[in-house]
Amino acid sequence: MSPALIASILVLLLVVLVRPRRGRGLHRLTARTTSRPASPQSHSIQLVTRYWPIALAGPLVVVLLGAQVLVSCLAIAVVLTLIAVQRAQHKRRTSAASRRGQIIEALDVLAADLSAGRPPIDALEGAASVSVDFQVAYAAAKLGGDVPGALDLAAEAPGAKGLRALAAAWRVAEESGAAFATLAERLAASLRADEAIHRQTEASLAGARSTARLLAALPIFGIALGYSLGAEPLTFLTATPSGWLCLATGLTLTAAGLHWTGRLSEVPT
């Protein structure tokens, strides 16, 4: 059996066995079999049943392919994970910014329709055509459901926090008879001002994030410099115990630095 085939089998086992947890929506659609929480013993048995092939994968790779291949695969996996995490964070920030902009545009449409004398349900229909986050509230309004509750639920998405204020304004308008069009206009103006501040903050933090990524990539240039001087840094890092310690320390510090920088530069969405 070739090393490539063995590695492919191990990767397939990892993908099949390490499944993501159910999301909130799937959990709500799934019938509850029992309301009693799982005991610690049953939880431990589930973890062992799920992850025992992964625990056996490491010794299997060492026996069949050697320690150097295992260390190399682990290092590559850590590097790819760090890259995937950075890309996911960037995608989440971009998606949140896009959602905030759409919600502000939808609020402008909602306020304009209400000021023109259209019923709230029709105004929600126009807002839902601009932002998908209003579609659940529009469906709830058509069915006579809890519109503020639907807006609160939609506000849990990243970048949709402004919908929680809209839900509060909707409740105030229902209970006190206040002019909802005026409340929607003021809310849109407030969210637009907050978005301007948010963009300024993101622009000022972009340099710090870029510097952190550049520092994380410097070891690659160091390895290239070592080969240009006639050394073999990768062989040292993957084939010797002292190299394993240096590699583990370097990857740990890199991951910690990126995580720390991400936490410091995180802006509430």
Image: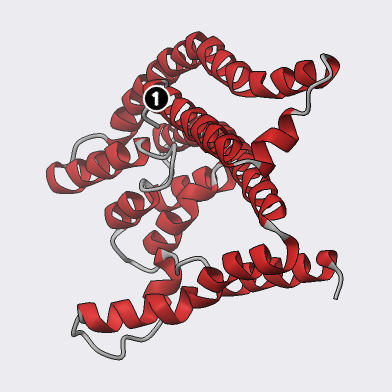
Q: From the image, tell me which residue sits under label 1.
A: 267
Which quadrant of the rendered structure holds the C terminus? top left
Image position, residue 2 (x, y; %): 86, 70
In this rendering, the answer to whether 179 lies above or below 13 is above
Left or right placement of residue 234 versus residue 171 in this view? right
Q: Residue at x 74, y 37 (%)?
A: 235
In this rendering, the answer to whether 41 lies above or below 175 is below
Please tell me in which quadrant of the rendered image residue 91 appears: top right
Helix, strand or loop at label 1? It is: loop
In this rendering, the answer to whether 24 lies above or below 46 is above
Image position, residue 218 (x, y; %): 65, 18
Give, as a three-letter code, the residue at label 1: Val
Is residue 64 among what the camera can see?
yes
Nearer to us in this view, 80 or 148 = 80
Nearer to us in this view, 24 or 4 = 4
In this rendering, the answer to whether 237 lies above or below 39 is above
Image position, residue 24 (x, y; %): 39, 65
Which quadrant of the rendered structure holds the N terminus? bottom right
Q: Residue at x 20, y 84 (%)?
A: 35
Task: Tell me the crowding category of disc 1: few under 14, some 14 to 19, or many 20 or more residues within 10 angstroms, Cα based.
Answer: few
Is residue 102 among what the camera can see?
no
Please tell me in which quadrant of the rendered image residue 211 appears: top right
Left or right placement of residue 267 versus residue 233 in this view? left
Q: Residue at x 42, y 47 (%)?
A: 157
